[in-house]
Structures are given as C-alpha cells and as structure tokens.
Amino acid sequence: GSGQNSLGVAPGWSPLGAVVVSLLAGLLSSCLQLAFVLGGDIVDIAESLGVSALLSADVIWFIAFGLATSLNFVYAATVITINKEWSCLDMSHPGEIRRIFVSFFICGAVLFSGHIHLYGTATGALGKRLGPVVSWPLLMCSTLLFGQAWGFLLKEWIPGDRGLNLNMLSMVFLLVSIALTGAAGAV
C-alpha cells in the first residue's frame, strides 16, 4: 500500500514489532484450548443436567465467546474512535452495498463461531481421553493449511518469491510438529 515501506510494513511499525504482535495473537488464540481443557467441570455439569455429550462443550464456547466478544468490541470501538473512522460503519450506503456489508458480517460470524462448535462436537465424539488431544491439533493443522491455501488462491504470495518458499517450508515443519505433538499426547 501507499503507506508501507519497502518491506511492506505499515507506518509506525517495525518488522520485529509486527512479528511480536503476531506471536502474541498466536498465544492468545491458544487460550480457547485452555478454556476447553480447564472447563471440563462445566462440561460435566452440563451433561449431568441432560445435555448430550456431543453438545455439552457448547456451554464453554458460550462463556468464552461472550467474554471474547466483549473484549473485541471494546478494542474495536477504541481503535475506531482513535482513528476517527466511525463513518466506515455508516449504514446509509445504497441498499446493495449495505446488503453486501451485512452479508459478509453475518457470514464471518457464523463461520468463525461455527468452526469452534464443530471442534467441540468432534472432541465430544472422540471422548474425554482422545478428544482434546486429537481434535485440537487437527483444528490447528487444518486452520494453518486452509489459511495458507486461501492466501495462495487469493494471490497474497508472488510465485517464486523467496518469502513464499520460506513460508511453505516453515508450514511443513509446523504441521509435522503439531501432528507429532498430537500423536504423542494420544499415547
């Protein structure tokens, strides 16, 4: 973009700062798994109240997403206020643009929360011993794999670019390490 330097890093950011924020985002994303594993008692209570084992993890997601939604809303509102960009949410745009905007919003919300509910269902189907050990690494592997595939299909990478080659190599190592960790945990 026009405000980026030769490395493509946004103004006011160093490459190291951007990498640190990315690592922090990865650390925080793993907290969903912590909520699931540490929320075992909540799942047991839901099941004792008659919720099926396949759906009992949804109670954890209700709590976790409720808290995350609150934090995301505060963060987004703060950034939008600081940047004075509330007008970007103006719904007085022509009908077609408004329909597209709302459709993308709803689609993104359903797909994001839906994948977590599917993860919880799959984990319940695998049982208390294998579920958390197998489902989480599979979720992480598929998230990485499909995220990279979308990036490639949307041409975020330039063919023959050294960055693409390094990215693909690092993805192979990361996916293998996640699979090995998951397999080791199942033993």
Image (cartoon, rainbow, N blue to C red):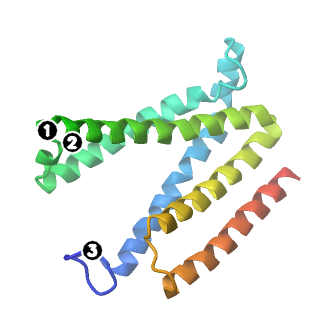
Q: Quadrant of residue 156?
A: bottom left
Whole-percent x and y of residue 34?
Answer: 60, 45
Q: Amino acid at mark 2?
A: Ile
In the rendered picture of this protein, how many numbered marks are placed on residues?
3
**In the rendered image, the vertical position of residue 52 relative to residue 103, given as above or below:** above
Closer to the eye: label 3 or 2: 2
- Alpha carbons under labels 3 and 2: distance apart: 28 Å
In the shown orientation, is residue 176 left or right of residue 65? right
Q: Which mark is residue 94?
A: 1
Q: Are marks 3 and 2 in contact (CB under 8 Å)?
A: no
Q: Quadrant of residue 101?
A: top left
The residue closer to the viewer here, 180 or 38, is: 180
In the shown orientation, is residue 87 left or right of residue 22? left
Secondary element at tag 3: loop
Q: Amino acid at mark 3?
A: Ala
Residue on which the image places disc 2: 97
Closer to the eye: label 3 or 1: 1
Q: Amino acid at mark 1?
A: Pro
Q: Are marks 2 and 1 in contact (CB under 8 Å)?
A: yes
- Alpha carbons under labels 3 and 1: distance apart: 31 Å
Residue on which the image places disc 3: 10
The residue closer to the viewer here, 141 or 71, is: 141
Residue found at x 58% / y 34%: 117
Other-residue count near label 2 (Cα within 10 Å), few / some / many at <14 / 14–19 / ≥20: few
- Mark positioned earlier in the residue sequence (3 or 2): 3
- Mark positioned earlier in the residue sequence (3 or 1): 3
